[in-house]
Amino acid sequence: MKKVVILGERRAGLIEVPDPQPKEDWTLVKVHASALCTEYKSYLLGRQLNLGGHEGVGEVVAVAQPGTAKIGDRVVILPGFPCGKCPLCLAGDAVYCEKNYDFEQFIGSKTGMGTFAQYTLAPDRRLLPIPDGVSYEHATLAIDGIGAAFGAFQAIGIGVSDTLLVTGLGPVGLGAVVNARFRGTRVIGVEPVPWRKKRALEMGAEAVFDPGEADVVEKIRSLTGGKGVDCAVDCSGKLSSQRLCIDAVRRRGRVACVGESNDDLVVRASPDLIRKGLTLAGSWLYNLGDYPQVMQVVQQSPLIDLLVSHLLPMSRIQEGFELLASGQCAKVVVKPWE
Ligand SMILES: [Zn+2]
Ligand SMILES: [Zn+2]
């Protein structure tokens, strides 16, 4: 089969490797579409991909033993290799499992790890059904495109009466705008790239500010009768935007962090948490029990086509990574068999 490799700084291509084989309750899935995410950062540095695609969907083509997955099933492949047995896994929060399988040790090689490939291996408990009528490219959005923000919305209870601030309108932040519009939530954005600002406005964001412009907090307050937004979700992973979320919410406001960052955010116990009554949450994907609702957004939102800006054959993966590096895109999806 063909799979994606990083060949050097800003160079990526395909290589031929043996087809992986199913083992125990790990099934073989023919990957029909896979969305690009943070992998472009490895591409820019010329660093080998850790996983090599984690937003894949496809069709079960082989099993090693009878189980819940059947040949021919159309499935979303949830990322990660959690144990399936610990309290977090049993509660549907497998993304936080601390006993993930070591793929290479379990399978015996890295072949079949990651979804930037024609086939991938996944434990059958990580496969979720794609409803009839949902295309493979749309189904990829049930992972991070719609799902990442959905988890944050659940974590801080975002609803129809809220005004929401979204900082960082990349693929995940634009997914937050889609989720907000689906819930009837008023949304204000912050984003420096003109292409993404424009896309967020097309999706129904009321205003999008540049993080570099003066008095952004004041401008956001002026749209909320001077009090601040009810809630904020940071999808940028930037310290200044995380801070902006805390400063722009009203008293008793709620903030969720979705964008990953290696920097240390300073949160002050008195002015931020106690006197303001702030709720601060982090969210990584979503609880498995929310999958039907995530898929409902994918199926029913009239904005979903605006969230997939580019659909490319996997052989053009380098172009996909460049699009993400440029910021001139929403979700980029590759098709391994084209
Ligand atoms: Zn992702
Ligand atoms: Zn577990």
Image (cartoon, rainbow, N blue to C red):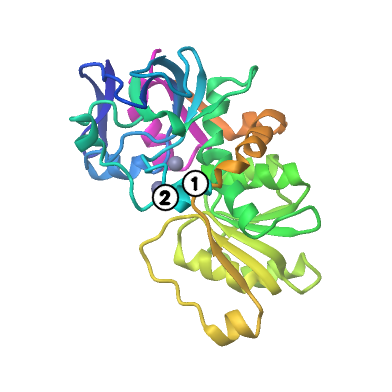
Circle 2 sits on which residue?
86
Q: Quadrant of residue 108?
A: top left
Q: Quadrant of residue 138?
A: top right
The answer to if 319 sits in the magenta stretch is yes
* Image height of 198 relative to 258, above or below: above
Residue at 81% in and 57% down:
161
Label 1 SS: helix
State whether residue 214 appears in this view.
Answer: no
What's the mark number on residue 308? none
Nearest to the observer: residue 36 or residue 96 = 96
Circle 1 sits on which residue?
90
User: Residue 120: x percent and y percent?
Assistant: 34, 24
User: Residue 208: x percent and y percent?
Assistant: 65, 54
The answer to if 246 sits in the magenta stretch is no
User: Residue 26: x percent and y percent?
Assistant: 35, 27
Q: Amino acid at mark 2?
A: Cys
State whether residue 24 appears in this view.
Answer: yes
